[in-house]
Every structure is written in C-alpha cells, then in structure tokens.
Amino acid sequence: MTRLFIFCVMLVFSSAAVAQDFNFGFKTGLNFSNIKGDLEKGDGYKESLDQNIGFQFGATFAWHITDIMGLRGEFMYSQKGTKRSFDGASYYKFFTPTNEIVITNGVRKEDLNVSNSYLELPILGYFKPHSRIEFYGGMSFGLLVNSSAFGNLKFSEINGAPANTTFDHELDFKYLSDKPREATYANPAETVNINGDNVPYPQTAGAYFDFVESQGKLYKAFDLGVVGGVSIYLSKSLYLSGRINYGLLDVTKTKADVSLSSLDNGNFISRNDDDRNFSTQISIGFSF
C-alpha cells in the first residue's frame, strides 16, 4: 500500500509537470492538532484530549487553468496528534517473573503526548479573486509513517497494597513497532506489595505493555480529510496560509483501543469510538 501511495504521488507530479501553466514551490509551518472522539467519563474517572503542536514541510505545485482559478497539490510531511490525559478510578496489570498476571484497582493519573506523522497529499482547487488573496479547498490523503507517544503514569490508592502506597513510571510508546508486554525494568526491578506478594513494575512501559497477545496497531495506516483555507500573498511568490483539515475516517482500531477505567473479568473492553484527526495549520510558502 505504501508503494501504491508513492506511485500515485509521482503520477500526480508528472501529470502536472507537462501542463503549460505549471509552477512549483515549497512551504513549512505548524499544525495545531487534536483527535476528536468519544471520551471515557464516569463516576470517579475522566479522560481528556487536548491540542498538540507539530510541524509540517514539503513541496507544492500548481496548475493555472485560468488567471483566477486552477488546481494545487502538495506533498507534505505532517505531524499531528493529541495530548491525552486520564485521571481517576482504573486498573493495573502486573506481570510476574513466572508469567502470572496480577490485576489490582486504584487511581490512575496518566498524561500522554501523542505524535502521529503522515505523508500527506492534498489535492486542492483554488480561486484567486485578487493578486493578494487566494481561497482553496479539497481533499487530503495521508499515509502514517511514524506513531509515538511519551508521558508518565502514576498509580495510587492501590487495592491490596499498604496504605499510601504509590508507584509511577515513564511511558514510551512506539505504536507501529512495540510488542505486547514490551517494557524495561530496573536492575533489580522495583516492586510493590500486593496482597503480601512483591510484584515488579516497569521503569518504562511500551504502547502495549498491558496486552498478553497482539491486538494490532492502535493507529490505522491511512487517513482522509477535507481541507479549506486562505492564502495571503506578500509578494508575487511569497505567501502566508491558514487552513483547517478535518478527518473523515476513524484513525484508531477498535481491538487495540481499550478502556482505561475497567475490565470485564480481567479482559479488556474494546472502545468502538469514532476518533478523527482535526488540525488548524499555518504556514509560509514560496512558489517559483
């Protein structure tokens, strides 16, 4: 699928390049992005998704059909994502050296900075009523090339542990490559006493640390969005641009997207959420 995407990009570039009124350029800027979806909220727990900031850069090209309208395309590297937080009643799965699973309840405070990088191909129509201003809109196709997150988890009010017991560890998620139960431990491993047994907890946990077997990758490989915006030309070639990019597809896989608030007899509860990328983008560009 990756080869097909790159082939389509090359086809668009080569087709536009033979047109008479063709020009190209480059642009770079910032993405103010979030993932819009259902949140876990209930008695004693709350999840939130907040804006994250990433960058974008790449090549642009245009085919001028008339003096005031035409087609524009871009081939961009674009960072999107969200800041995800969970605070409240939850569970924790420990794995012992003898491969036993110990599950306890408590209060989870988790903060996670998610960054998803896409190769994007926006195909846009534009209307330029004045030499200094341009309106445009169209579709954007995205291929996920990197997906990661970092943060921290703190667990307290632990069922079966001595009073005031807490522990915390780092989160270092590589969604495209991490495996179930992937984690690093201190040497010797730090432990917490649960019902009289000292069970180890990780120093750093991977994206699927809680999983016994693979449920697939959390984020899907492809995205599709609608784009609309305006460009202000400071000169014939230099411009500032602002746009909104709204995702049309659910970017998370249901089996790998699980509840943090509760389990079902020790098993994960899948979340059938509709999670979509949303970003406001500002950029500066130059066309030749």
Image (spheres, rainbow, N blue to C red):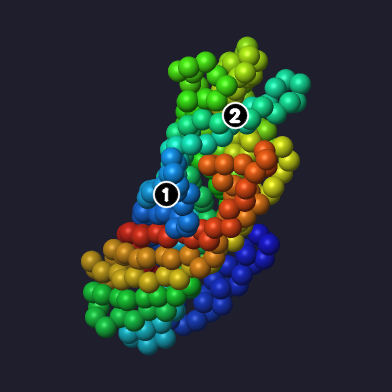
Residue at disc 1, secondary structure: strand
Between tags 1 and 2, which lies in front? 2
Left/right of residue 35 with respect to residue 195 in the rendered view: left
Q: Position of residue 57 (x, y in %)?
A: 43, 55
Instruction: Residue 61: tell me if it is visible.
Output: no
Q: 113 or 123: nearer the eye?
A: 113
Q: Earlier in the sequence, mark 1 or mark 2?
A: 1
Residue under the point 52% across and 15% down = 162
Left/right of residue 274 with respect to residue 230 in the rendered view: right
Q: 36 or 147: nearer the eye?
A: 36
Q: Quadrant of the N terminus?
A: bottom right
Residue under the point 62% across and 51% down = 270
- Amino acid type, label 2: Thr
Q: Position of residue 48 (x, y in %)?
A: 41, 47
- Amino acid type, label 1: Leu
Residue at disc 2, secondary structure: strand
User: Mark on residue 49?
Assistant: 1
Position of residue 205 relative to residue 268, above or below, is above
**Residue placed under numbered mark 2 in the picture:** 104
Instruction: Residue 188: tell me if it is visible.
Output: yes
Which residue lies most toward the right here? 98
Q: Quadrant of the C terminus?
A: bottom left
> How many angstroms separate mark 1 from mark 2 (CA)?
26 Å
Q: Quadrant of residue 11?
A: bottom right
Contact between marks 1 and 2 (CB within 8 A): the answer is no
